[in-house]
Amino acid sequence: MIEIDSIVKTYEGVPVVDAVSMTIQPHTICAVVGTSGSGKTTLLRMINRLVTPTSGTIRIDGEDIRGIRPYELRRRIGYAIQGHGLFPHWTVAQNIGAVPRLLKWSKADISARINELLELFQLDPSQYRDRFPSELSGGQQQRVGVARALAARPNILLMDEPFGALDPVIRAKAQEDLVAIQQRFGTTVVLVTHDMEEAIYLGHNIAVMDAGKLLQFAPPKQVIGRPATPFVQELIGTSERPFRLLSLSKIADHLEDGDADGDPLPATATLRDAYSELLWSGRSAAPVEKDGRLVGRVSLDALARLAARPQ
Amino acid sequence: MSVTSASPSHDRPHWLALDRLGVLITLILLSSFLLPFALFRANRILLGDGLPLLASMQPVAASVLLLALAFGVGAALLRLPALIKLAAGFGVLTILFIAMGLSAETLMPADNNYARVSPAAGFWVLVFGLALLVTDALTRLRLGPWTRIGILLGVCGAFWALLWSGLWNELSILKEYANRAPAFWNEARTHLLLAFGSVAIAAIVGIPLGILCYRVRPVRAALLNILNIVQTIPSIALFGLLIAPLAWVAANVPGAKASGISGIGVAPAVVALFAYSLLPIVSNTVVGLLGVSAPAVDAARGMGMTWLQRLVQVELPLAFPVILTGIRIVLVQNIGLTTIAALIGGGGFGVFVFQGIGQTAMDLVLLGAVPTVVLAFAAAVVLDAFVELTSRGGRRA
């Protein structure tokens, strides 16, 4: 659990982060969204003491972080940034092993952990361990960057626009990977982004920031349905609201009994995917399959009700 | 019928076309025939007579040299592969150097130790033209660092063989050498000690100063400004300026005199060369450290490296090629500057240069100047290769 308590950061008297308080629950992803200059990156960097707050406290699992030496604190917290920040003169293996080496793990443990992480990120260790970052594609560099952040099994992972430099296809894959890894390890993730779509897809909670202030801190459904200020509403985009709402749920959670014609849809797809598919194929309902057998149906009428503003 | 085969050079081999630099090299080589090839003087300080190539050596030697030069012109003019041009350049240069030795043997009167034969303008123009051919070929070949060092060693070996064979013994510069062989090697040692020693001290002091400038911003502006001012002091003035303070130190600080410090000699020379070396080393260290990719530094901080770990493991290794470039600049500069140290009794090859100027004996000036140039050139080649080696892998991204 990360407790941020009326934290303030001013540069030459100008507040960059202005009295922000929020509590990030353990094992969740918190997406911090805002335009550039909103203070979101500064907020993130205060959690691992890369930036010293002007006032206020941050506690991790109840412990005030001012009581921990900065470099010791940082070794406990994963840190991944845009443009990966890999060390160009070190191999992939040396990069991933950086924090475990700082923590003085044994050579064998470090080597095993490197292989484990490379396999987790679908990079064959025998092929990639000894490559230099410049010999990897952009998507591979980004994966190695996240692998390095996770190397010492941190409970907390801070990510600053980690997917900002990736093209849309690779970014979608990277986001899926992150969700899978977060679920597998239960890591608490704080992720800064300017992309509301990404925040809605990844975040269990979304923190919307503007001009240093925290405007709203709530689950995506609430941010979409009940935006706290006109700015939050603008950030979501009025015409996008119903579709964003649909993208939050899976078909499996809203199954209807009955049958329908045509190709079945997978139960794991989002309601937004289902809506799009129904419109495109000109059907009013479609069958749903799970593990190869039909389990029910999804209809345009039901989707229309679910897309309406929550009461 | 394919479109590409319609090009005008279709029925002609590719190499049968004029190389533009080759035309220039040809003109340079031809112009040398308007100038004397060798210079004969009755003694070492007279002006002497210039002799054209054909009058400088036996007809056989002259015809071989002319044939070789014609071959060199052909290699320069045609668009041949760079490797062939390189081989031709080195080959013709070798024949030219041998011919110069033969010319001296022919022209020197028997049993006369006062007469002097030296290369004249025509010879130097030929060397320049052929060096252009070689350099151009080397540039086009884009050789790796190790190959370049290898070629340097090869050229040095060839020169050593030429000198060792005694073929050049009748040339004026070697006559001067023969009269001063022990002094030559003595001054060579002093020269190397002054040039390399001052750079080593400057690196030991300058790199930490550069790190300090990088980390403490106010220090950066102040220190770099001071060093900039030092750099603008004319070298002779700086050597002179140091005489008084060091003489005072020698006279008043106990033990200073015993450890070799005095107003003239090696001490002020080392101090002056050190002062000139600081700015390039400090500023290159700062520039190199500032040039390390910001995300890499941020990541290093964010993962929990202490400042020392960050410096040693990330920042210095990534800045190293730039720092090494600073050391290369300073080393080449100091090898040249060290000649001036002779003025204040510091020794080095400058001793011959200033003696030669005093006696209007140009050969003696050359005995000091040529080794200095060769040394500086070799240092530049070796350190350039090192800079390239250390920046591999590191900054390819």
Image (cartoon, grey):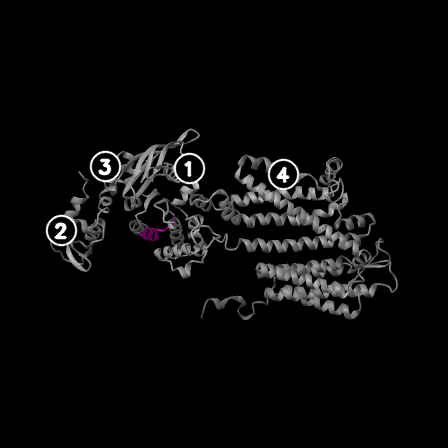
Q: Which residue is label 1 attached to?
A: A51
Label for residue A256?
Answer: 2
Quarter of the image holding residue A46?
top left
SS under mark 3: loop
> Looking at the image, is mark 3 or mark 1 nearer the viewer?
1
Parent chain of label 3: A
Q: Which residue is label 3 attached to?
A: A226
* Badge 2 and badge 4 in a common chain: no
* Badge 2 and badge 3 in a common chain: yes
Parent chain of label 4: B
Check the image and report above or below for B301 versus B89.
above
Residue at 39% over, 55% down: A113
Parent chain of label 1: A
Q: Amino acid at mark 3?
A: Arg
Label for residue B228?
Answer: 4
State the extent of the magenta-drawn residues as a range: A165-177
SS under mark 2: loop
Q: CA distance from mark 3 to mark 4?
A: 63 Å
* Residue A277 pos. (x, y %): 21, 53
